[in-house]
Image (cartoon, rainbow, N blue to C red):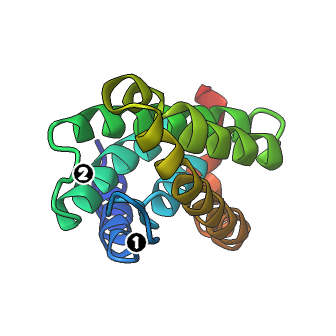
Amino acid sequence: MKRKTLSLLALFIALSVVGASIKIPAIVGSVALDAFPALLAAALLGGGAGALVAGGGHLVSALLGGLPLGPLHIVVAIEMSLLVFIFSRLYHRGRNKYTAAISFVIGNALLAPLPFLFLMGVGFYTAIVPSLMIGSVINVIVSILLIPKLEPFFASSLSERIAKL
């Protein structure tokens, strides 16, 4: 891995730490603005980089929140990584940012908490979905607004990564 890419990954993970400190009121204290740096990384550096930032960002957010779901946060980190990777694929295919954004929001707010429906019941699921929906929408809006502003700085490496898709 190139030093520049490694430095950028560290920067985006650091942004996730900052975003993890901005909490959205929820029944579980781990809903935060930690996903927008991962979405930025996915759009600017590629799906793999975004997935790494998403997983790491979620784990830091959960750690700052006191790990309310315990080891289940590893499942959530994997889900976040997968959702951000899918976001990247949809975003770069035809540059369809709205389909990518809507897919991320639906996946993060409705599909990702499904395992908890079976583990913790309907009450937990229905209590967490509204907070996840608000958090997902805010994360996506911030990223969609910032991506066009940052793309000129990443133009050459971005086109190389998109060509590899």
Q: Residue at point 53% right, 36% down?
A: 83
In terms of sequence position, does the residue under pointer 1 or pointer 2 come before the other? Answer: 1
Q: Amino acid at mark 2?
A: Leu
On-image quarter of the N terminus: top left
Q: In the image, what residue occupies the spot 15% across and 37% down?
A: 71
**Residue 154 rendering spot, x and y as whole percentages:** 58, 61
Residue 152 image-quadrant placement: bottom right
Q: Which residue shows up at 66% across the image and 39% down it?
A: 106
Q: Is residue 107 visible?
A: yes
Q: Where 137 falls versus 88 (above or below)?
A: below
The residue pinned by badge 2 equals: 59
* Image position of 47 with respect to 149: above or below: above
Q: Position of residue 42 (x, y in %)?
A: 54, 47
Q: Is residue 154 left or right of residue 22?
A: right
Residue 51 location, x and y as percent? 42, 40
Q: What is the quadrant of residue 30 in the picture? A: bottom left
CA–CA distance in space, label 1 to label 2: 12 Å
- Describe the element under mark 1 as helix, strand or loop: helix
Binning the other alpha carbons within 10 Å of mark 1 as few (below 14), some (14 to 19) or many (20 upward) gives many
* Tag of residue 19: 1
- Tell me which residue sits at (17%, 54%) in the image: 67
